[in-house]
């Protein structure tokens, strides 16, 4: 019996972890049922226990409880949604039919950002400064998985003008918003990713993304 056997979770615990991973969805449809304060506290605590390069903990969270501010964020997203549609050219109409956010519907809105003064953190970032962003992404994923385990939906909205969100939240110039998170109760979780169900894209086979001792070949149908 190996030492790792004693550190292993129980079978139901392992199954629960993998269930949260595979049933997590980028949700856009919410009910108006409020999220309990203790649930939100657990989600934020889960985020704060994410790994971070050099233990810099670059994440900052802003709960948006003011309805006017929530509406202003919605308007910023809507402006970028239309700009994105124009940039998509032939897929513009298809994109505009997609629901890309639930800011006005969900129980909680949380803006996640990169903290100011990040340049002083060099450990792990000297050649890869974007690892601060990777660390924030880990925190967001922790919220996502914890929310799914709690029976809550979450959607990551990234369609926004950075400077507009900075102004709305009175952020320092060198702090940067990364995500507007919509969190709340849902009628049901999507059976598959919404963009896959809508025919926008499909999950590529895992085998296309993994290779041994060399970079994976270009995915079929994509330019080299």
Image: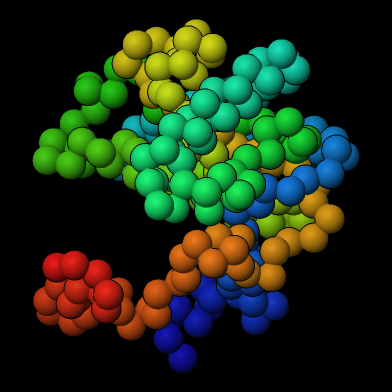
Q: Residue at the location (87% across, 39% down)?
A: 33
Colouring mode (rainbow / by chain / secondary structure / one colour): rainbow
Q: Is residue 52 in sight in this rendering?
A: no
Residue 161, x across and y down, in percent: 43, 24
Q: Is residue 172 in sight in this rendering?
A: yes
Horizontally, residue 126 falls left or right of residue 120, namely left
> Is 84 or 158 nearer to us in this picture?
84
The number of numbered discs placed on residues in the rendered structure image is 0
The relative height of residue 193 versus residue 124 in the rendered view (above or below) is below
Residue 143, x across and y down, in percent: 59, 46
Horizontally, residue 59 falls left or right of residue 117, namely right
Where on the picture, by quarter, is residue 72?
A: top right
Q: Residue at the location (59% across, 63% down)?
A: 198
The relative height of residue 208 versus residue 61 in the rendered view (above or below) is below
Image quadrant in which the C terminus is located = bottom left
The relative height of residue 131 versus residue 199 in the rendered view (above or below) is above
Q: Residue at the location (24% across, 28% down)?
A: 121
Residue 99, x across and y down, in percent: 63, 47
Q: Residue at the location (63% across, 40% down)?
A: 101
Where on the picture, by quarter, is residue 21?
A: bottom right
Residue 134, x across and y down, in percent: 34, 44
Q: Residue furthest right?
A: 33
The relative height of residue 82 versus residue 15 in the rendered view (above or below) is above
Q: Residue furthest bottom?
A: 1
């Amino acid at each position: 019996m190996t030492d790792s056997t004693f550190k292993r979770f129980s079978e139901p615990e392992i199954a629960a972890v993998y269930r949260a991973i595979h049933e997590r969805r980028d949700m856009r449809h919410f009910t108006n049922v409020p999220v309990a304060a203790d649930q939100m506290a657990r989600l934020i605590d889960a985020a704060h226990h994410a790994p971070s390069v050099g233990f810099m903990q670059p994440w900052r969270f802003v709960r948006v409880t003011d309805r006017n501010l929530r509406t202003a964020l919605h308007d910023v997203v809507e402006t970028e949604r239309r700009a994105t549609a124009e940039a998509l050219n032939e897929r513009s109409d298809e994109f505009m039919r997609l629901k890309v956010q639930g800011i006005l519907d969900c129980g909680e809105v949380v803006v996640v950002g990169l903290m100011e003064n990040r340049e002083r953190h060099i450990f792990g970032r000297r050649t890869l400064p974007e690892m601060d962003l990777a660390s924030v992404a880990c925190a967001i994923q922790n919220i996502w998985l914890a929310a799914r385990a709690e029976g809550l939906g979450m959607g990551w909205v990234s369609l926004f003008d950075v400077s507009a969100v900075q102004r709305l939240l009175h952020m320092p110039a060198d702090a940067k918003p990364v995500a507007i998170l919509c969190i709340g109760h849902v009628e049901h979780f999507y059976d598959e990713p919404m963009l896959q169900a809508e025919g926008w894209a499909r999950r590529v086979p895992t085998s296309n993304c993994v290779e041994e001792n060399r970079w994976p070949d270009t995915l079929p149908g994509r330019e080299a």
